[in-house]
Amino acid sequence: MNIAVIGTQWGDEGKGKIVDLLTPNVSIVARYQGGHNAGHTVRVGSDQFVLHLLPSGILRRGVRCVIGNGVVVDPVALFSEIETLGKQGVEVGDRLLISDRAHLILPYHRELEELAEKRRGDRKIGTTARGIGPAYEDKAGRRGVRVGDLANAVEGGDLASIIQENVAARNRALKVGDKDWRTVYQDICATWHRLERWVGDVSVSLMQAFESGETVLFEGAQGTMLDIDHGSYPFVSSSSATAGGICTGLGIGPRRVGTVLGIAKAYITRVGEGPLPTELHGETGEQLREAGQEYGASTGRPRRCGWYDAVAARYAVRVNGLDALAVTKLDVLDGLEEIPLCTAYRYGDSVLTEFPSRGQSLSDCQPVYERLPGWSRPTAGVRRYDDLPLEAKAYLDRLAEVTGVPIALISTGSDRADTILIRDGLIDKWQSGRPRSPES
């Protein structure tokens, strides 16, 4: 009965809203990768909540939230987010569990990431410069600091030595200033008294939940095309954003994952550098950006916009084993006379229907479009499938056909309630016998 919510594009697909909608049907929401470079926005009436590190399920009372070992944690960012939610009336309390195996983002990670971006010049990745990449580099290099290391830290011990060596490497790399490792060490150790109440063994806790019959929702950050192994490398994030990352990022077996729901916008966006085959330039791209308020929740940067890419979507279906799609921001396409849909790529003299494995090949691909009629009657706020314009239904049917999986849920606005649940669809069946808020 567990369910995974996975982004199928380059992130920002609307996962936060979908997780929030499904959370009343689960006991636990577990985040398995990424860091506070993620940005999930959830609107409830006139209130807006922006989450970066905490799972979106934290907005629902009684739901427990987990941050797995696959996540990198900046304690300062975590405390700030918890405090902001408190001011908005959402108390975390004892509903949070952080893996003692999760790695920490330390101040020098942010500085090193800024330096790395500057050195890349025209080949920059377009990161958020929040230290995510360098923290994962230290993890892979076996010089990282884990949350649990803070519990028994003593001056002169292993943790002090690791931080001393890492700060010395930072000083050599930056060639500016001389950061004192003792200050870094003392500051990070001082966070333990605040972190301790939430730290534990996530793998054991989840296994106990499974054995008790509790349902878990696995929440991904970023999207498939930003996965370190399967994304548009090297313009990717530093973690495993696909469904495979659930097992390694939480310490559970693959048979526990259950249903896999992919989230896709009715068009496509991307923040940062890297190829985007269907990218729009000019007036139409600006129109989509403004209609969809396509600005990064973490950075405020404008997102690049393009038409729906079925080649990338089919790839996401394959590498994640998707059971169905949730299509978001359908309302952003309201009023367009025609909507192009990318079904293949042209690469030189060849037509590609499968996603290329090399980033350079993707840069050289040109989209092959079929064109569908738009609709003049608005879909914004529509909550019943039968009330959608015929052309919107035809567009959704075609998306499902060219992507290869059924559509289970449609979002027609930013509010929780602006949602259509497909009757007898995957989510409707998954929720069978349980309370649900969207009108089907």
Image (cartoon, rainbow, N blue to C red):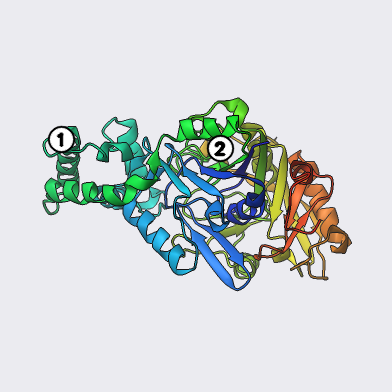
Q: Amino acid at mark 1?
A: Ser
Residue 242: image tag: 2
Q: Which quadrant would residue 42 be assigned to in this image?
A: bottom right
Q: Amino acid at mark 2?
A: Thr
Q: CA distance from mark 1 to mark 2?
A: 35 Å
- Give the residue at mark 1: 161
Taking 271 as reference, is 432 left or right?
right
Taking 8 as reference, is 337 left or right?
right
Q: Residue at x 77, y 70 (%)?
A: 335
Q: Between 386 and 396, which is closer to the camera in this rendering?
A: 386
Any part of residue 275 in sight = no
Task: Work out whether 290 lies above or below 339.
Answer: below
Taking 401 as reference, is 202 left or right?
left
Q: Are marks 1 and 2 in contact (CB under 8 Å)?
A: no
Mark 1, Cα crowd under 10 Å, few <14 / some 14-19 / many 20+, is some
Taking 200 as reference, is 227 left or right?
right
Q: Residue at x 51, y 50 (%)?
A: 55
Task: Work out whether 168 lies above or below 83.
Answer: above
Q: Quadrant of the N terminus?
A: top right
Q: Residue at x 70, y 44 (%)?
A: 310
